[in-house]
Amino acid sequence: MGPKGGRREKHPRRRIVDAIFYVVRTGCAWRQLSKDFAPWPTVYWYFTWWHDDGTVERIHDALRGQIREADGRNAEPSAGLIDSQSVRTADTVPAATRGFDAGKKVKGRKRFIVTDTLGLLLAVHVVAASVQDRDGGRRPLLWTRLDHPGVKKIWADQGFAGRLVDWSTTVLGRELEIVRKDLDQRGFQVQPKRWAVERTFSWLTAHRRLARDYETSPARSETMLRWAMIGIMVRRLTRVRPASRAGRRPLTRTSA
């Protein structure tokens, strides 16, 4: 039977979710979905429906809380990290939502993410690549303040320095600490307190759909990022060993 007593659904929702994961991971177009899945219009309809009604965000947030608790932490974080990433866009992306990042020499969109210290997403915001970090960082910081009031401190790189630090203190009542490079640094080096958010970008861009932005709207791009993170968190949860029946030990993680 269906969820409201009607006929049974023709396509199980598990297969719909599998099809969405397939698109995110492989980067194929919706129309190129394998015949093993439901018809692509059905899969895309569910993708947009779950985007519009907030289902994707609720699933994402529930999984994040489970991972934090399995790691021995509170479900809600107390600190975070913010960073941005400029990516090229496909030709089908409307010009009004694209821009040029002069620093990175990238024409496309810019992704702003706020993560906890484990690298799990707290807020996502996608804008034109021409938006500077200190301007584009306001909205994800505000969302973090509203959705995760326990986050008292956020670390950021030098691109977020300046008036955004003052704005975060006076308007949000939260500390935004800038992690600066060593004066004698040459080439790339892992920055203390910031490596987790940079690792998250590496996790996300391992999904071919996210290596370039193909979505017609920034909001759909944000949903694609959440779907990718949902897949990452589900795989991580499968590596958590359940409590032993004999010893009733707490959850522990296998090496990864």
Image (spheres, rainbow, N blue to C red):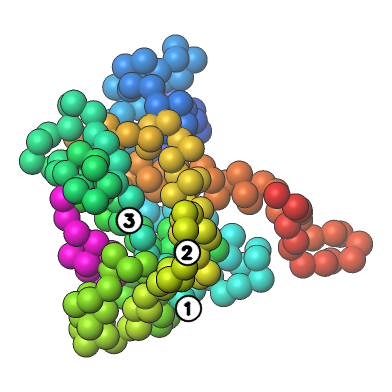
Kindly state the secondary structure of the residue where label 2 is placed: loop
78 w.r.t. 61: above or below: below
Of the pair 51 and 254, the residue shown nearer to us: 254
Are dots 2 and 3 in contact, CB under 8 Å? no
Magenta stretch prevailing secondary structure:
helix
Residue 23 image point, x, y percent: 41, 28
Of the pair 125 and 58, the residue shown nearer to us: 125
Q: Quadrant of residue 19?
A: top left
- Residue type at tag 2: Gln
Q: Tell me what residue is drawn at x 55 percent, y 63 percent.
A: 118
Q: Tell me what residue is drawn at x 46 percent, y 19 percent.
A: 37
Q: Residues within 10 Å of mark 1 (few under 14, many from 20)?
A: some
C-alpha distance separating marks 1 and 3: 21 Å
Residue 73 part of the magenta-drawn span: no
Please name the residue that numbered disc 3 is placed on: 84
Please name the residue that numbered disc 1 is placed on: 78
Residue 47 image point, x, y percent: 33, 36
Res. 153 in view? yes
